[in-house]
Image (tube, rainbow, N blue to C red):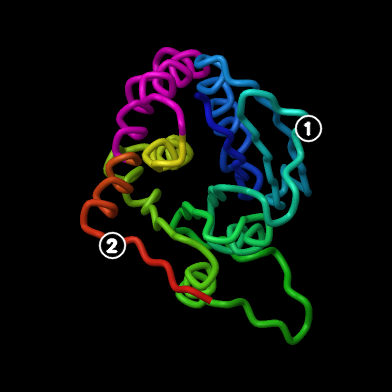
């Protein structure tokens, strides 16, 4: 029996949020899931917020996810992940890329919280997997593969009802041939970053 899964992808313009959500949806369609997707763009071309809602299941009626109903939030940077947290259901899962992008401006008197403070807030509300996207991408020699690393991390969650092979095929279908091998390596390292945490019981969840 197929499962239902609602995922919110959150980041800023230029991080590959739309591409990643498209690849996720294609992987689901390969396995004959019903798929719906919607995007909300701020000033994405100038580094503003961008959110993509993706829903897969036996039958999906609408692409929009209600507040407090998402199963997973995939955050491309820490601040936008925190802003998207109200979308997550109780005891939901967060994958967060360990990168903080300060906003272009802040209201007078408002101080930006540190990465540590934002992570602490996330961990009071959700199961959190911290992914060192920049570090893994640096090891691979290409900082543009962070989004594929996050896709690999998402694929390793037990609540995701899709096969690894479907993700790999979707990557090959969506990307130019010259970049497929590199992105498949990035995908696998992203998977391993979550699998290793699970194996070591390092995933943290602090109850309210």
| Cα–Cα gap, marks 2 and 1 | 36 Å
Residue in view at x 26 percent, y 60 percent: 201
Residue in view at x 47 percent, y 58 percent: 99
Say whether residue 164 is magenta. yes
Where, by quadrant of the figure, is residue 86 drawn? bottom right
> Where is residue 68 shown, x and y percent of the image?
68, 56
Q: Nearer the viewer, residue 46 or 22?
A: 22
Other residues around mark 1 within 10 Å, as few (<14) / some (14–19) / many (≥20) = few
Say whether residue 31 is magenta. no
Q: Secondary structure at mark 1?
A: loop
Of badges 2 and 1, nearer the viewer stands: 1
Drawn side of residue 152 relative to residue 34, left or right: left
Drawn side of residue 121 relative to residue 67, left or right: left
| Residue of label 2 | 202
> Where is residue 112 shown, x and y percent of the image?
62, 77
Q: Is residue 131 above or below residue 153?
A: below
The magenta stretch is 161-189
Q: Is residue 100 above or below residue 67?
A: below
Which mark is on residue 62? 1
Other residues around mark 2 within 10 Å, as few (<14) / some (14–19) / many (≥20) = few
Q: Secondary structure at mark 2?
A: loop
Which mark is on residue 43? none
Q: Judge whether residue 151 can be spotted in this image.
A: yes
Kindly check if marks 2 and 1 are in contact, taking CB atoms under 8 A apart as contact: no
Q: Nearer the viewer, residue 152 or 64?
A: 64
């Amino acid at each position: 029996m197929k499962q239902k899964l609602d995922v919110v992808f959150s980041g800023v313009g230029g991080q590959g949020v739309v591409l990643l959500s498209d690849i996720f949806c294609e992987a689901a369609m390969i396995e004959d899931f019903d798929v719906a997707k919607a995007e909300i763009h701020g000033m994405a071309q100038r580094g503003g917020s961008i959110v993509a809602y993706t829903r897969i299941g036996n039958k999906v009626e609408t692409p929009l996810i209600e507040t407090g109903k998402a199963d997973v939030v995939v955050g491309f940077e820490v601040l936008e992940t925190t802003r998207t947290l109200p979308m997550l259901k109780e005891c939901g899962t967060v994958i967060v890329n360990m990168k903080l992008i300060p906003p272009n401006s802040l209201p007078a008197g408002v101080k930006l919280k540190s990465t540590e403070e934002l992570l602490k807030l996330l961990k009071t509300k959700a199961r959190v997997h911290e992914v060192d996207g920049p570090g893994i991408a640096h090891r691979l020699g290409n900082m543009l593969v962070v989004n594929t690393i996050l896709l690999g991390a998402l694929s390793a969650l037990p609540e995701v009802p899709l096969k690894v092979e479907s993700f790999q095929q979707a990557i090959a279908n969506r990307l130019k041939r010259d970049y497929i091998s590199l992105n498949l390596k990035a995908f696998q390292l992203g998977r391993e970053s979550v699998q290793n945490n699970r194996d070591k019981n390092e995933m943290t969840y602090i109850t309210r």
